[in-house]
Amino acid sequence: MLQTYAMETIAVTCPSCFELFDVALPPAQECPCEVDYDCEVCCRPMVIAFYDGTADAKSLDD
């Protein structure tokens, strides 16, 4: 039998365009961690830091 798991997401605000979008939370055992990500709205690069069930986006476009 195939088991499926619901993906937990969290809202992140892009530090460049300030639009809000959802990203998948990494498994708790992998946190804290940082992930390179491109904004789903403006496509600008950022780093998202995940820790304690929260996420903080920082711009790489400086």
Image (spheres, grey):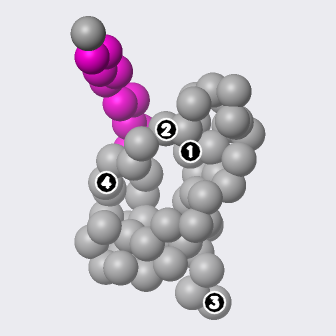
Q: Which of the 4 quarters of the picture holds residue 1?
A: top left
- Quadrant in which the C terminus is drawn: bottom right
Q: Earlier in the sequence, mark 1 or mark 4?
A: 4
Residue at image position (31%, 15%) is: 3
Regarding mark 1 in the picture, which secondary structure is present there? strand
Q: Which residue is mark 2?
A: 25
Q: Quadrant of residue 50?
A: top right
Cα gap from disc 4 to disc 3, whole angstroms: 21 Å
Residue 60: x and y in percent read 61, 80
Q: Main secondary structure of the magenta part?
A: loop
Query: Where residue 42 appears, x then y in whole percent?
Result: 31, 79
Q: Is residue 35 above or below residue 3?
A: below
Q: Nearer the viewer, residue 52 or 3?
A: 3
> Label 2, label 1: how many angstroms apart (C-alpha)?
8 Å
The residue tagged 3 is 62
Q: Residue furthest right?
A: 32
What is the spatial separation of the Cα atoms under label 2 and label 3, in whole angstroms? 25 Å
Magenta-tinted stretch: 2-11
Distance from the alpha carbon under mark 1 to that under mark 4: 12 Å
Residue at numbered disc 4: 21
In-front residue for pair 24/56: 24
Q: Position of residue 55 (x, y in %)?
A: 56, 44
Could you tell me the amino acid type at mark 1? Ala
- Number of on-image labels: 4
Q: Residues within 10 Å of mark 3 (few under 14, many from 20)?
A: few
Query: What is the number of the mark on residue 55?
Result: 1
Side of 18 where 49 appears, left or right: right
Going by the numbered disc 4, the residue's amino acid type is Phe
The residue carrying pointer 2 sits among few (fewer than 14), some (14 to 19) or many (20 or more) residues within 10 Å by Cα, namely: some
Foreground mark, 2 or 1, reads 2
